[in-house]
Image (cartoon, helix red, strand yellow):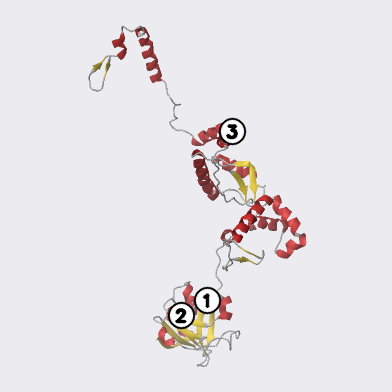
Amino acid sequence: RDRSPGGIFLKPSWWRFQSSPCHQNAPSFLHSIRRMAKENTFEVTQEKPHFPTLEESTLQYWRDIDAFQESLRQSKGKPAYNFYDGPPFATGLPHYGHILAGTIKDVVTRYAHQRGYHVERRFGWDCHGLPVEYEIDKKLNIKGHHDVLKIGIDKYNEECRGIVQRFTTEWRRIIERVGRWIDFDNDYKTMDRSFMESCWWVFKQLFEKGLVYRAFRVMPYSTACTTPLSNFEVSQNYKEVSDPSIIVQFKLTDEENSYVLAWTTTPWTLPSNLALCVNPELTYLQVQNKTTNTKWIVGKDRWPWICSSVKKNAEKDFTVLWEKKGAELKGIKYEPLFDFFKGKALENAWQILTDGYVSTEAGHASSTKL
């Protein structure tokens, strides 16, 4: 007898059929049920499993049954799912960014396969752009475009092609290790003529449909490579550097031996300078050098910093002549540093303007005005 949770005694159902010719088989049936209850349907899970080992065993199982190619064989003839992939550069090793993006791509394509699509997945290599050329420039000690012409463009291109497969083994090992299903044996390269002609064909279709237009955009430019750079290429050589900054004195036109001091981190813009700007609410000083009698107009808050920059003592070397708000300086004219625009600029050029965006904070972009 068995006792139910509710405390009611229940007789096994086979007792009710003792008159049946098969009733003698009932005990063996119960024995089979009891034996099955003692067996595990799944393998016993380890209390502290070593996941890398389990992953390796799964990868090996996939290799043994050729799981990826078998999935393609079984889905052949089904609607195609086209996944446009941006291939990695062929000159470097995979890093976290590649693994993260590759995992997402693997999820998308696996999901499409499970929805009944045939998803062809071929690994690709980006062979164009500066990363490949940069490696060859280091190898051949090339400093500029003229060095490329000396050795010949054909030989230079062959050198570039020669390093495309340099890290193929490392890429395959890592990509397979993370479990991504993709075909390395039937890969493609952007330097393949069929690939390049396909890109030009697509561009031609867009052009003929009027979807291509000409415009202008400010781009970073490499003078050594004589080519614009992408944001990725610029960041490859990103460095923390000290900005070149200078203090410039602009001579006033209406007062002898008097100047306005301005600080800038973009000295290459000085030839085109047409105006200076002050904050109308900030306080400015006119100081006079006790030795040379030169007069400077400077921001009061920046005066100590200027003295330290020019290696002077504010009290011993200078006399404060006046103190004014920036609004009172509006309209003061000064002489241009260079004469490129003399006689060409408007009459209101080369004078002090006022605006609230000017700041006296150190390193602030707007403090480059005055």
* Amino acid at circle 3: Asp
Q: Secondary structure at mark 2?
A: helix
Q: Where is mark 1, residue-wise?
A: 264
Q: Earlier in the sequence, mark 3 or mark 1?
A: 3
Q: Residue at x 62, y 44 (%)?
A: 170
* Amino acid at circle 2: Trp
Q: Are marks 2 and 1 in contact (CB under 8 Å)?
A: no
Cα distance between the residues tagged 2 and 1: 15 Å
Q: Is residue 42 above or below residue 126?
A: above
Q: Secondary structure at mark 1?
A: strand
* Amino acid at circle 1: Thr
Q: Secondary structure at mark 3?
A: loop
- Residue 264 pos. (x, y %): 52, 76
Q: Residue at x 23, y 18 (%)?
A: 8
Q: Quadrant of residue 215?
A: bottom right
Q: Earlier in the sequence, mark 3 or mark 2?
A: 3
Cα distance between the residues tagged 3 and 2: 76 Å
Residue at the extreme front: 209
Residue at the extreme left: 7
**153 vs 369, nearest the viewer:** 153
- Residue 218 pos. (x, y %): 57, 68
Q: Where is mark 2, residue-wise?
A: 303
Q: Where is mark 3, residue-wise?
A: 66
- Residue 263 pos. (x, y %): 51, 78
Q: Are marks 3 and 2 in contact (CB under 8 Å)?
A: no
